[in-house]
Image (cartoon, rainbow, N blue to C red):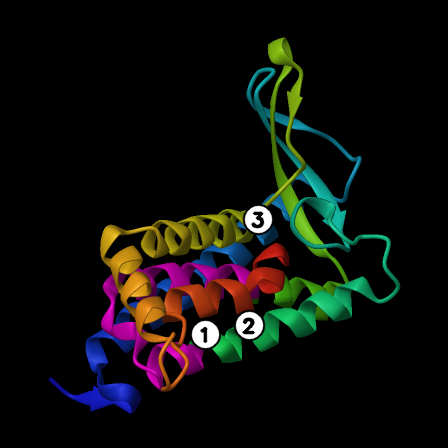
Amino acid sequence: MRRIGGGVGLGRLLLFGSIALGGLAFDLVTKSMVFARIGPPHRRIVSVVPRVLELQTSENTGALWGFGAGWPGSSLIFAGLSLVAAVIICYWLFFLGAASSRALTVALGLIMAGALGNCYDRLVFGHVRDFVHFHVDPIRFDCAIFNFADNMLVAGALTLILYAMRPEEAARREEEQSGAGAVGPVARPSPAESILEATASGSRSS
């Protein structure tokens, strides 16, 4: 199999690209369709499942679930963080070889798709276009309005967490920590841990 930087197979690059670009396209198309059909915020609400799920357009200048919406220049701040996260993801996957793991490739492909989808909105519109409103009225649960880019960011982050919690990863960390007490190089965190920490801000920018 043809190899790229870090000894990663070309198939992993295609897998990552398909998820990232496919997810990005799906996110942007659904946003455009819903906003074209429903109109700007506060125009009207379309019920999908009564008292549970509805389509309601919203413009979010913050990150995931409106975090940091009141910050000056918040859209540009979170757009910049998304681009930094995208660079870090590509570096870890294809130059440090994290793409040798299919799970990491899928997880980071989802994060890339979500980050780029919301980054596009921030750079083009100055805000993120949200439209899915999930709430359960009988138990008074009301989730902030979101979009599919947010879903991909959350799914990717959860996959990274589950990957880092695998028994194999825990055993590897214990071995590294036990060997770090003696003279020698400091144990380096796994790609999953490093990416999760480095893209924490970026994954909020969904």
- Nearer to us of marks 3 and 1 is 1
Pick the quarter of the image with the C terminus: bottom right
Q: Residue at x 25, y 51 (%)?
A: 167
Q: Which residues are magenta?
A: 90-115
Dot 3 and dot 1 residues touching (CB under 8 Å): no
Give the spatial CA distance, label 3 vs label 2.
28 Å
Question: What residue did someone put label 3 on?
Answer: 33
* Magenta residues, dominant SS class: helix
Residue 108 showing in the rendered view: yes
Q: Amino acid at mark 3?
A: Met
Q: Amino acid at mark 1?
A: Ile
Q: Position of residue 195 (x, y in %)?
A: 46, 68
Question: What residue did someone put label 1 on?
Answer: 89
Q: Amino acid at mark 2?
A: Ala
Which numbered dot is residue 85?
2
Give SS at disc 2.
helix
Q: Label 1 crowding class (10 Å Cα cut-off): few <14, some 14-19, many 20+?
A: many
In this rendering, position of residue 103 left or right of residue 64? left
